[in-house]
Amino acid sequence: MNTATILVVDDEPQLRRAVKATLTDLGYSVIDAKTGEEALEMLRHETPDLVLLDLNMPGIGGLETCRAIRETSDVPIIVLSVRNTERDKVQVLDAGADDYVTKPFGIQELLARIRAAMRRVPASNDTNVRVVVSDELEIDFATRRITLNGHVERLTPKEFDLLKFLVDHANKPIAHRKLLQTVWGPDYGDEVEYLRVVVNQLRKKVEPVPSKPKYLLTEPWVGYRFAMPAAESAA
């Protein structure tokens, strides 16, 4: 049985009831909200383990709700939507969501995505280190923050997991599939757009000139590589 609490945010009462009944039967605790505003107010007092968030809602909508949640919380977020274009997925992932599920969906698919989103990359022994990449770039994995030329940026959960894995294997090309299965889970491997979005997010935080990366490099037809200068040190 599961003990996690899931917040379901959707303006469709029937969907909220169906998802709530299914998840409750499986042992999850479920709370629900019908608007983004209601969800944000609820999150001031509740600490769910995961958020299921509809994209198309009245009021501020799912995209803005996702961004607002990410400003203060690392809770896994799965966005639900009838839209299925790459542009929609990119917008959602760029807003900080962990995953994207298209309606209508099968309950087994949703449960698999929930398990994957709540899964975290196993912590290594040096998860709490501060990595000094260069005079301009410092990565503090303990606080999930990056300092670039004195400016501090906060990492989202997927950014943290991806960057940590790349830094742990610095200067080695890592294949797309390996990165996807490590960061998102073993059922992933073909969702290259997920990687592209998170890498672009990271480049805005670690690169002095994101359009001309010198740390987070693309390995054509393979994947990505974190280029660690020879003078790298950790404290």
Image (spheres, rainbow, N blue to C red):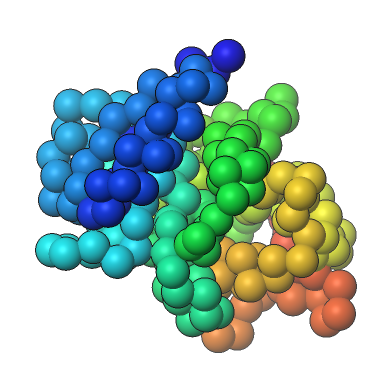
Q: Position of residue 37 (x, y in %)?
A: 14, 51
Look at the picture and state if 16 lies above or below 95. Answer: above
Rendered image quadrant of residue 51? top left
Quadrant assignment for the N terminus = top right
Q: Tell whether 34 sits left or right of 212.
A: left
Residue appearing at x 46%, y 42% in the figure: 76
Of 124 and 179, the residue lying toward us: 179
Of residues 144 and 7, which is closer to you in this image? 7
Q: Position of residue 34 (x, y in %)?
A: 20, 48
- Image check: 192 left or right of 178? left
Q: Is residue 40 above or below residue 189?
A: above
Q: Is residue 102 above or below residue 36?
A: below
The image quarter containing residue 130 is: top right
Residue 199 visible in rendering: no
- The total of numbered circles placed on residues is 0
Q: Look at 63% across and 53% down and name the residue there.
A: 163
* Residue 153 % position (x, y): 39, 55
Left or right: residue 144 versus residue 228 is left
- Residue drawn 17% across and 26% down? 45
Quadrant of the image for the C terminus? Answer: top right
